[in-house]
Image (cartoon, rainbow, N blue to C red):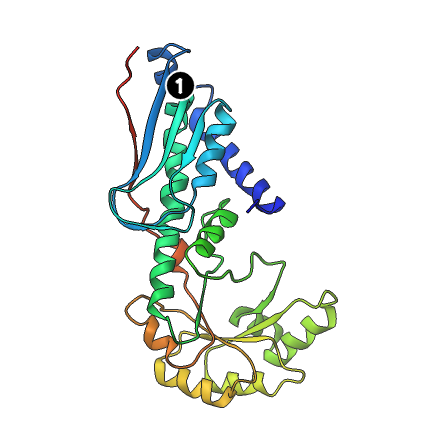
Amino acid sequence: MPLQADLQRAMADAVRRALEEDLGPGDVTSTWTLPPDQRARGTFVAKEGGVIAGLLVAREVFRQLDEAVVLTFWVEDGTSVAPGTAVATVEGPAIPILSGERTALNFLQRMSGIATATRRYVEAVAGTGAVILDTRKTAPGLRALDKWAVRLGGGQNHRQGLYDMVLIKDNHIAAAGGIAQAVERVRARNRAGLPVEVEVKTLAELDEVLALEPPVDRIMLDNMDLPTMREAVRRTAGRIPLEASGGVNLERVRAIAETGVDYISVGALTHSVRALDISLELEPWAP
């Protein structure tokens, strides 16, 4: 399936910036050790099991360096692989392959790490009806790619930024003078009809949001313990979708889901992800 135009642009821009950062005026090691007509062939291998993501980004790396470099995929993005799986082969002029190796791996390893972590959370809540969401806690400049990797892992995206959804948090509430005041001000200016979510930390705040008419689109339960979440679900009674947030990890995400919340947002998917171990193994060159 072709990428959406905005994602294609974000990918190309991220790759351009990464190559500029790494190459500077040129790859002195590769250009000084290899003749310009030398060719190379190599295989990207997953050293550990996980979910592969970022193959299209790796292809874009080599495309920007030299369109003569060909990257062939042996699995699709979003595929779970076992350790030792060959996920792609690259072939073409040796200098751009070596110059792009680290940048391609950086994207591929990070995105695969995000997709792998997301898949684990999704599997942990399977059967509960809860949806795993990401957050805005992404690497600066890589939000589109980080959130793409979450989708490839089976999760869903929360808001993309500060422009596509209203999320009234504790500091907004404090500055506005209260929940009702903050929501009223948003509604007076929300001509685009953006969805409105309000963060609550206590059951009393929850009751205040539930009393608003018309209802808001979603309520975030921030750092609540399990009994309080269960009571929040009981009081809400399905009238407004509930999102659990804060202190979410793999050990307790199933218990959170079983309280009956609709969404669980997990900052760890992107802010502290461990890269998946993937390497590029070049074949010996014979003239």
- Residue named by callout 1: 95
Query: Residue 103: x and y, percent?
Result: 41, 33
- Residue 136 percent coordinates (x, y): 49, 57
Measured as percent of width and height from the top left, residue 253 is found at: 34, 71
Query: Mark 1 Cα within 10 Å, few/some/many (few <14, many 20+)?
Result: many
Residue occupying the point 64% across, 76% down = 183
Residue 272 shows in this picture:
no
Question: Looking at the image, is 233 positioned above or below residue 167?
Answer: below
On screen, 4 above or below 59? below
- Viewer-nearest residue: 83 or 166: 83
Q: Residue at x 40, y 74 (%)?
A: 223
Image position of 28 with respect to 243: above or below: above
- Name the residue type under label 1: Ile
**Res. 246 image quadrant:** bottom left
**Total marks placed:** 1
Residue 219 visible to the viewer? yes
| Residue shown at 53% from the left, 69% from the top | 171
Toward the front, the furthest residue is 74
Mark 1 lies on a secondary structure that is helix
The image shows residue 125 at horizontal and vertical percentages of: 36, 71
Name the image quarter holding the C terminus: top left
> Is residue 48 shown left or right of residue 118?
left
Q: Quadrant of residue 256?
A: bottom left
Q: Residue at x 39, y 76 (%)?
A: 128
Front one among 96 and 51 = 51
